[in-house]
Image (cartoon, grey):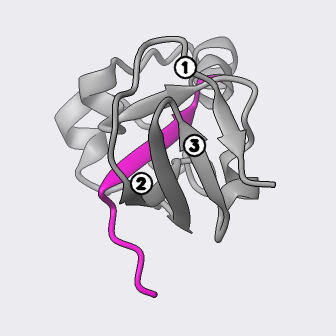
Amino acid sequence: MKIFAEVTLIEMETLGALRRDHYICLAPDEHRRNLTVRDVPVNHLVGKRFWVGDVVLLGGRLNTPCRYLDPVTGKSVCDLLKHRSGLNCAILEGGDIKVGDEVKRST
């Protein structure tokens, strides 16, 4: 099954490391991911079915940062986000997602 980037996730810890280690703060419109998750290693969700709120997602491929991100944001982040740029997911079942909803893996 080909996974399209219907929903994209990025880890809060990645954004925090950029801020802490490189003094770079990316706003949501700059990192361009749909959902920011905390305490969830998105690399572990590749090929896995999981829930965010009422929505069932299937983890696809890991994102690679887009080269245009540097000139658009005026920040040198592409190389720093390599292998940490988030996860593309397919929506298997739609529903509602609210701020604070947990990410739950299928058992």
The three-letter amino acid code for the residue at tag 2 is Pro
Observer-side mark, 2 or 1, equals: 1
Mark sitting on residue 51:
3
Local crowd at mark 2 within 10 Å, few (<14), some, or many (≥20)?
Answer: many
- Precedes in sequence: disc 2 or disc 3: 3
Mark sitting on residue 65:
2
The three-letter amino acid code for the residue at tag 3 is Trp
Q: Residue at horizontal 24%, vertical 26%? A: 29
Residue found at the far bottom of this picture: 1
The three-letter amino acid code for the residue at tag 1 is Asp
Proximity of marks 2 and 1: CB atoms separated by less than 8 Å: no
Gap in angstroms between the C-alphas marked 2 and 3: 25 Å
In this rendering, would 14 be left or right of 68? right
Q: Residue at horizontal 66%, vertical 23%? A: 38
Proximity of marks 3 and 1: CB atoms separated by less than 8 Å: no
Q: Residue at horizontal 55%, vertical 45%? A: 81
Above or below, 34 relative to 45: above
Local crowd at mark 1 within 10 Å, few (<14), some, or many (≥20)?
Answer: few
Quadrant placement of the C terminus: bottom right
Judge whether residue 14 is colored magenta.
no
Residue ID for mark 1: 101
Q: Which residues are magenta?
A: 1-12
Percent across and percent down for residue 82 are 57, 55
Q: Could one spot residue 11 in this view of the protein?
A: yes
In this rendering, would 27 be left or right of 72? right
In this rendering, would 32 be left or right of 41? left
Percent across and percent down for residue 4 are 33, 70
Q: Nearer the viewer, residue 2 or 85?
A: 2
Percent across and percent down for residue 34 are 34, 36
- Precedes in sequence: disc 2 or disc 1: 2
Q: Could one spot residue 80 in this view of the protein?
A: no
- Precedes in sequence: disc 3 or disc 1: 3
